[in-house]
Amino acid sequence: MSILTKNIRSVKKIFSDGIEVDSSAYEVLSDAAKAIKGVPGLCLEMGTRRAGSAKIIINALLENGDLGRSLLCVDPYGDMVHANEEGKFARVDYTNDMRKDTQRNLYRYAHGKPVNVYLLILEDIEYFKRFPDGYPVYDKTKHLMDRYALVFFDGPHDIQSVLTEIEFFKSRTPRGGMWVFDDINKYPHDEAVEPKLFELGWKLAAKKSPKASYVKVKG
Ligand SMILES: C[S@@+](CC[C@H](N)C(=O)[O-])C[C@H]1O[C@@H](n2cnc3c(N)ncnc32)[C@H](O)[C@@H]1O
């Protein structure tokens, strides 16, 4: 077993519904999902794996009475080479079997709950190419949703990818919107991302390693 795989495995927590997290300090994500009540737009997570973080977002929305939101979970799976940290690219275990498990477990979890969950089998840049004008949500009528109230950045953990993601979401997030970054110690987040967020009109909401959340206050 590689050191990389071992590190990931050492923090994962499996629940009886097959849904699993692989990190810590998820209260930062949960609090951010609660803070967006009243802010219009989608919730989107980049990097879903076994849907542990998606479940945390769903629970936070429901506990907060923030009903009827749409949550997009974007992940290519396919055992692709993954930017697990700055300068380190490797296949981890994000396979198509993991995708199949997650499709079943996540949709089963969301079934009957007042939240619209969509697991999109795409990587970040394909999503950006295909949905620059918004994602169509069908709920009695068609809503082309082009605003993001919550974004969880937990896909590729290299600076170039994170900056590309920021570029897409920066003009599409309304004031009061929240962004949460995971694994901030795996790429130069404090040096290269945080100063940019401050410049763009974002304020730090919470930081607890390995996560940080920000709220849009200007712009
Ligand atoms: C750290 S795991 C996500 C963990 C999950 N958010 C949680 O907290 O339980 C990273 C995931 O990102 C996905 N991923 C890799 N490259 C990606 C990309 N370019 N765009 C979106 N997701 C990506 C991987 O397939 C993997 O499932």
Image (cartoon, grey):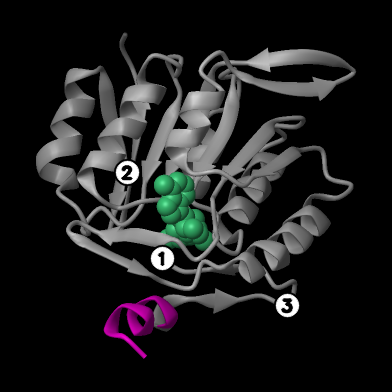
Q: Which of marks 2 and 1 is in front?
A: 1
Which amino acid type corresponds to the residue marked 1 in the rendered image? Ser
Helix, strand or loop for disc 1: loop
Query: How many residues crowd around disc 2 within 10 Å: few (fewer than 14), some, or many (20 or more)?
Result: some
For disc 1, the marked residue is 24
Q: In which quarter of the image is residue 24?
A: bottom left
Q: Looking at the image, is 89 positioned above or below residue 9?
A: above
Residue 72, position as x, y percentages in the image: 62, 38
Is 127 one of the magenta-colored residues?
no
For disc 3, the marked residue is 16
- Residue drawn at the location 19% of the way across and 53% of the way down: 187
Q: Distance between the residues labelled 2 and 3?
A: 30 Å
Q: How far apart are marks 2 and 1 (CA)?
A: 14 Å
Residue 218, position as x, y percentages in the image: 31, 11
The reply to whether residue 26 is in sight is: no
In the rendered structure, find residue 206 and report the number of the disc placed on it.
Answer: 2
Looking at the image, which is closer to me, 150 or 83?
83
**Quick one: label 3 or label 1, which is nearer the N terminus?**
3
Helix, strand or loop for disc 3: loop
Give the magenta-colored segment's residue range: 1-9
Q: Looking at the image, is 69 positioned above or below residue 17?
A: above
Looking at the image, which is closer to me, 143 or 195?
143
**Which residue reaches farthest left?**
191
Query: How many residues crowd around disc 3 within 10 Å: few (fewer than 14), some, or many (20 or more)?
Result: few
Q: Quadrant of residue 96?
A: bottom right
**Quick one: label 2 or label 1, which is nearer the N terminus?**
1
Is 4 one of the magenta-colored residues?
yes
Looking at the image, which is closer to me, 143 or 182?
143
